[in-house]
Image (cartoon, rainbow, N blue to C red):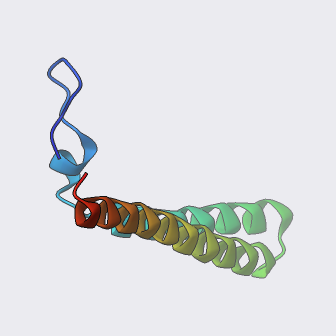
Amino acid sequence: MTNDRSGPTPDREAVTGGFSPSVDFISSVIAGLVLGVALDWVFDTRPVFIIVFVVTGFVAGFYKLWRSSAVLEEMAEERRRGS
């Protein structure tokens, strides 16, 4: 992909090298884990919030993967059509 924007800021794919979907997934799970640990520590309810937020992180991560794969499928379909 080319960078159509003006200025010295590179596009996201050039910086991440294509690791963006996996980083999004892992960061969603880690964010859920950290939030769950913090809430369990505050409310002293081990492991209720950890389980809830790690599962939520997995769901959010899979949703991001699904959404990025849909974008890739659309791009492939446009290439097949010759656009």
Query: Percent position (x, y) of residue 10?
Result: 18, 34
Q: In this view, does 47 lie to the left or right of 3?
A: right
Q: Find the residue positioned furthest to the front.
A: 81
Q: In this view, does 71 lie above or below 73?
A: above
Q: Residue drawn 84% across and 75% down? A: 45
The residue lying toward the viewer, choosing from 32 and 16, is 16
The residue lying toward the viewer, choosing from 21 and 30, is 21
Q: Quadrant of residue 77?
A: bottom left
Query: Percent position (x, y) of residue 17?
Result: 17, 57
Q: Is residue 75 left or right of residue 24?
A: left
Q: In this view, does 48 lie to the left or right of 30?
A: right
Q: In which quarter of the image is residue 82?
A: bottom left
The residue lying toward the viewer, choosing from 25 and 37, is 25
Query: Percent position (x, y) of residue 49?
Result: 77, 72
Q: In which quarter of the image is residue 60?
A: bottom right
The residue lying toward the viewer, choosing from 35 and 3, is 3
Query: Percent position (x, y) of residue 23?
Result: 36, 64
Q: Residue drawn 69% across and 68% down? A: 36
Q: Residue drawn 23% across and 39% down? A: 11
Q: How many labels does the image show?
A: 0
Q: Residue drawn 41% across and 60% down? A: 71
